Amino acid sequence: MDRVSAALAAFQSGFHCTQAVFSAFCEDLGLERSIATRLAECFGGTVCNTGMPCGALLGAYLAIGLYAGRSEPGDLSAKFRTEALRARLAEGFTARFGAADCRTLLGCDITKKEGLEAAYTAGAMARCADFVAYAAELTDKLLRE
């Protein structure tokens, strides 16, 4: 299964955006899927439930870090490479969707109970599948370059 299909399948099975995107890359990068989904669990609603950045984008950032991130503090080449990939990912995602935060992308503040309920009621959360698919697609492209 390709990474976009894997991310969408994970999302449609009930994992949140961050888990879905990150788990689509983890096994190819040496991390068990069950560990990846557990590591990403607290990022539902994104960082500290702030809605920033979009969870799909955050899952892609985690994949980039796993792929290119530094394991030694002095490895500045890995640090700069990872940052360059992260910046290209953010730029491409924002160019495609016009924003990188849930509030703008969904038109609801999902960090509040009322906003989350409104997002589900209005069908805004259905758009998340598009964010998951594109984040996985763009990440896959960047990692192949």
Image (cartoon, helix red, strand yellow):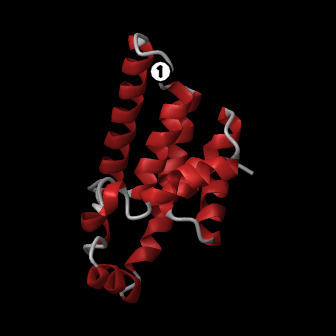
Q: Residue at x 45, y 17 (%)?
A: 78
In x, y percent, where is residue 28?
69, 36
Q: Residue at x 32, y 85 (%)?
A: 118
67 horizontally vs 55: left or right? right
Query: Foreground residue, 107 or 77?
Result: 77
49 horizontally vs 27: left or right? left
The answer to whether 44 is drawn above or below residue 143 in the figure is below
Q: Residue at x 51, y 52 (%)?
A: 40
The residue identified by callout 1 is: 70
The answer to whether 104 is drawn above or below residue 35 in the figure is below
Marker count (numbered): 1
Q: Residue at x 68, y 52 (%)?
A: 34
In x, y percent, where is residue 29?
65, 33
The answer to whether 34 is drawn above or below residue 64 in the figure is below
> Which amino acid is tagged 1?
Arg
Q: Which quarter of the image is occupied by the C terminus?
A: top right
Splitting the image into 4 quarters, where does residue 14 fall? bottom right
